[in-house]
Amino acid sequence: MKKNCLEIVRQKCENCNGCALANSRSNIVFGDGDASTARIVLIGEAPGEMEDETGRPFVGKAGQLLNDFLAEAGISRDKDLYVINTVKCRPPENRVPTDEEKAACRKFLDAQIDIIKPDAIVLCGATALKSFVNLDKKQTISKVRGKWMTVTVDGVDYKAITIFHPSYLLRNSSMEEGSPRRLMQEDLKNIKETILPDVNNVFSANNLTFNSLASV
């Protein structure tokens, strides 16, 4: 049922010309994951070049790094997550989408959340965070990441949490205590234990492959 509803929304999205991004896209990047099993909706920023070519979110270097962190945390991208972006078309030169572009795409974003009805929403990066939360000038993603909050979509409240975008982690390879990559591990551990508890697969920092994550 969820898959059928999402397919209807996808078809409408494919025919959308609500903003100028439609003129330069190769493909819409609608979503990725198993709608029938996903308990978490992860929201990124916008498609990049490889995403535009393949029609799938998070398939470039940043996506591979995200996959590595998810795997280390015991979170299945294929089963536990439904992955989407704030906009479905690639902005030129991979720039941040404008408020107008996000507004034009918001009906598709909200529809996806309405259909999935996740146990939690993970806001991946500042653009996704700002799409749901009004921040004052003193608030940065570093200060709000890892903290559970409530966001409202079409009158329904959802548990939500913010994590760093993997493209930021590509520029910060340190695995030192307090580094962005170590904080990402902590946040995913939090998500795993809060939303996807599994007594047979307990997350252990002692078993993390620090070197493999640092080398990406």
Image: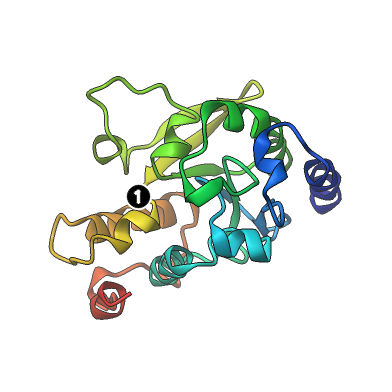
Corner quadrant of residue 137: top left
Is residue 43 visible in this depiction of the protein?
no
The one of 21 and 157 positioned closer to us in this rendering: 21
Residue in the foreground of this view, choosing between 20 and 107: 20
Q: In the rendering, at what x and y percent does residue 101 appear? A: 60, 32
Residue 120 point in image, percent of width and height: 53, 43
Task: Rate crowding at label 1 as few (under 14), some (14 to 19) or many (20 or more) other CA atoms within 10 Å.
Answer: many
Which residue is located at x 38 percent, y 57 percent? Answer: 167
Residue at 46% across, 29% down: 150
Element under disc 1: loop
Residue, x 24% and y 79% (percent of image)?
211
Looking at the image, residue 165 lies above or below residue 181? above
Q: Amino acid at mark 1?
A: Phe
Is 113 placed left or right of 67 in the picture? Answer: right
- The quadrant in which the C terminus is found is bottom left
Q: Quadrant of residue 114?
A: top right
Q: Evaluate whether residue 16 shows in this view.
A: yes
Q: Which residue has dot 1 on it?
A: 164
User: Which color scheme did the rendering employ for the protein?
Assistant: rainbow
Q: Position of residue 25 (x, y in %)?
A: 68, 51
Counting every numbered tag in the picture gives 1
Side of 91 where 37 appears, left or right: right
Return the residue found at the far left: 177
Q: Position of residue 44 (x, y in %)?
A: 50, 48
Which residue is at a point 60% across and 61% down the rendered structure image? 51
Tell me the quarter of the picture where residue 35 sits: bottom right
